[in-house]
Amino acid sequence: GGLARAFQLAGARSLLLSHWPVRDDAAAFLSVETLRRAEAGEGRAEALRAAELAMVQGQTGIAGERNPAVWASFVLIEG
């Protein structure tokens, strides 16, 4: 999309985006957990995958976290 491209042109190395409106609690968890894991040395894509798996496995305590509608909209675009 246009906004993603604008960030890439501005020098962003990666973008964490969602395909549809998301819940604040899920977005906060996935964003923070992905960054935490990436800063610890995991690749960004693997960090997002691990954060999503934590939700799929019911490990976060977020209501309805196992439902793909809660976590599946997130994608990582690396440029």
Image (cartoon, rainbow, N blue to C red):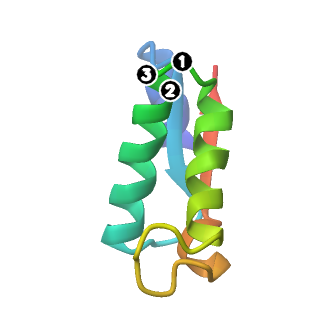
Where in the figure is residue 10, as x and y percent of width and height? Answer: 41, 16
- Circle 1 sits in a helix, a strand or a loop, which is it? loop
Identified by mark 3, the residue type is Glu
Where in the figure is residue 22, as x and y percent of width and height? Answer: 44, 71
Toward the viewer: 40 or 67? 40
Residue at 64% x, 70% y: name it: 57
Q: Quadrant of residue 45?
A: top right
Residue extending farthest to the bottom is 64
Q: In this view, does 9 lie to the left or right of 23?
A: right
Residue 41 is marked as 1
Residue 39 is marked as 3
Task: Please tell me how crowded label 2 is: few (under 14), some (14-19), or many (20+) other residues with Cα within 10 Å.
Answer: some
Name the residue tied to disc 2.
Answer: 38
Identified by mark 1, the residue type is Gly
Residue 12 is marked as none
Identified by mark 2, the residue type is Ala
Task: Please tell me how crowded label 3 is: few (under 14), some (14-19), or many (20+) other residues with Cα within 10 Å.
Answer: few
Residue at 31% x, 69% y: name it: 24
Task: State whether residue 34 is above or below residue 22.
Answer: above
Residue at 51% x, 34% y: name it: 15
User: Marks 1 and 2: in contact by CB < 8 Å?
Assistant: yes
Q: Quadrant of the N terminus?
A: top right
User: Marks 2 and 3: in contact by CB < 8 Å?
Assistant: yes
User: Marks 1 and 3: in contact by CB < 8 Å?
Assistant: yes
- Circle 3 sits in a helix, a strand or a loop, which is it? helix
What whole-number distance in Å separates the C-alpha atoms at marks 2 and 1? 5 Å
Q: Is residue 60 left or right of residue 24?
A: right
What whole-number distance in Å separates the C-alpha atoms at marks 3 and 2? 4 Å
